[in-house]
Image (spheres, rainbow, N blue to C red):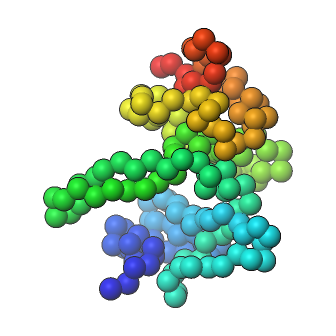
Amino acid sequence: NDPSIRRTLLEADKSFQHGENMPYRLRGRSGFLVDLIKNEGDPPWTDKDSMSPGDIPAAPISTMRWIANAPKVVPVAIDLDGYPTRIAAADPRAFALFKLWLSEQPDRDPVKRPRDRAQALAVAALVRDKLRHLAFTPDQLRMFPAEVVEATRHTQGFWRADTADDSPSPAPK
């Protein structure tokens, strides 16, 4: 019984292999990438790896604290045996805002910037269209620096002001 992430991915797609000299990345034959990332320790030398032996090592990312500090969402899914199971995940609004901010960083790899932006807009659209109970409001985005929220407020396709206090919300269709 191997609880590794690598085993789980290989069960879904046997073509996953390490790629691009990045030990934290697996690539499927279809081009699908999986990067395993984690919040960097503070200070970084206190970082400990808690993965299974031989599993994909997670790459530490210092700005991941924003997502790590975001409220979790815990939807219920149906497992393979037909039983309900809870899945704890990072709030998709935090992911979208983080990826949008990341796409605008001048020191970000130019190859990754368009992908980061596309991921941000796709997740924001998912929240807007399918997860309407999740609002983009300053109170619910308080784990981000205020200047990050403010700097991304006027991104077309992401935010719109539609509340009395002019708080950010996902853009309309």
Q: Is residue 135 left or right of residue 86?
A: right
Q: Which residue lies most toward the top here?
A: 164
Residue 143, compared with residue 30, is above or below; it is above
Q: Is residue 149 above or below residue 65?
A: above
Q: Can residue 64 be seen in the rendering of this structure?
A: yes
Name which quarter of the figure residue 114 lies in: top right
Residue at figure coordinates x 83%, y 45% from the top left: 106
Question: Quadrant location of residue 18?
Answer: bottom right
The residue furthest front is: 139
- Quarter of the image containing the N terminus? bottom left
Picture residue at 63% right of the left edge, 21% below the top: 167
Residue 154 in the figure: left or right of residue 24? right
Point out residue 38 in the picture as x, y percentages from the top left corner.
62, 65
**In the current view of this chain or complex, which residue is farthest to the right?**
106
- Please name whichever residue, 19 or 55, is drawn nearer the observer in this view of the structure: 55
What x and y, as percent, mark residue 138?
Answer: 64, 30
Residue at screen point 16% across, 58% down: 82
Give how far across and how far down residue 33 sits, in percent.
52, 61
